[in-house]
Every structure is written in C-alpha cells, then in structure tokens.
Image (tube, rainbow, N blue to C red):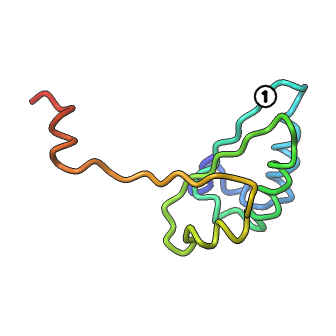
Amino acid sequence: MAFDLFDNIEYRDPKIFYPWAKEQLQDNEKYYFLLDEVQLLDEFVSVLNGLADKKNCDVFVTGSNAKFLPRDIATEFGGRGDEVSMYPLNFSEFMSCYDG
C-alpha cells in the first residue's frame, strides 16, 4: 500500500485501512503487508502495532521521511521490529552493473 498515491488516499484513515487489512487475513497462512510512506496514515503507530500483534502477519514499512528518524522508530516500536537502512548506489557501483 503506497499511502502517497491518490488512489489510496482513503486508506490514510485508520478506520478504513485497519478493517481492510484485517479482512485480508483470511486464514492461518502467512501474510505480508508492505506499507510505503506510512507517516501519511493517521495513527500509524497504533495501526502497525495492531497488525504486528497478529501471529500470521509481517509488516514491512518503507519511507523516506526525514521527520521520522531511526531513534523515533526505536522509541515507538522498541523490541517489535528491525530497521534496515538502504542507500542509493554510488557512481562506481552503478557502473559495475550498467553495460554501456
């Protein structure tokens, strides 16, 4: 779910998104939620904690918002997740993959 897309603007309301997300959990199979720009989701901390509490649900959050720093993540979700920082390729790394 990309919360920055206009097509998904209604899902920024947690009273719409959370019931939709719970509805996706149809059985005991493993489900994965990939959420981009989650800071646009109102009450996102409560929503993420609610989803993360489900045993058959993994939540992956991406975003590039500098307002939500790694120390904030550690505070809000202490002990409930892992942070993976990703950086763009530098020029030599890019050229090692580019044939041209």
Provide residue 37's location: percent of width, then percent of height: 58, 58
Is 52 above or below relative to 29?
Answer: below
Question: Which residue: 70% across, 62% down?
Answer: 41
Tell me if 67 is positioned left or right of 9 in this view. Answer: left
> From the viewer's perspective, is residue 76 above or below residue 83?
below
Q: What residue is at 49 percent from the left and 71 percent from the top?
A: 66
Q: Is residue 5 visible?
A: no
Horizontal and vertical percent for residue 95?
15, 38
**Toward the viewer: 4 or 49?**
49
Q: Quadrant of the N terminus?
A: top right
Tag 1: amino acid: Lys
Q: Is residue 66 visible?
A: yes
| Residue at 37 percent of width and 53 percent of height | 87
Label 1, secondary structure: give it.
loop
How far from the left and from the top, in percent, is residue 21? 81, 43
Q: Residue at x 70, y 41 (%)?
A: 33
Question: In the figure, 1 relative to 98: above or below?
Answer: below
- The reply, left or right, for residue 42 in relation to residue 53 is left
Residue bearing mark 1: 30
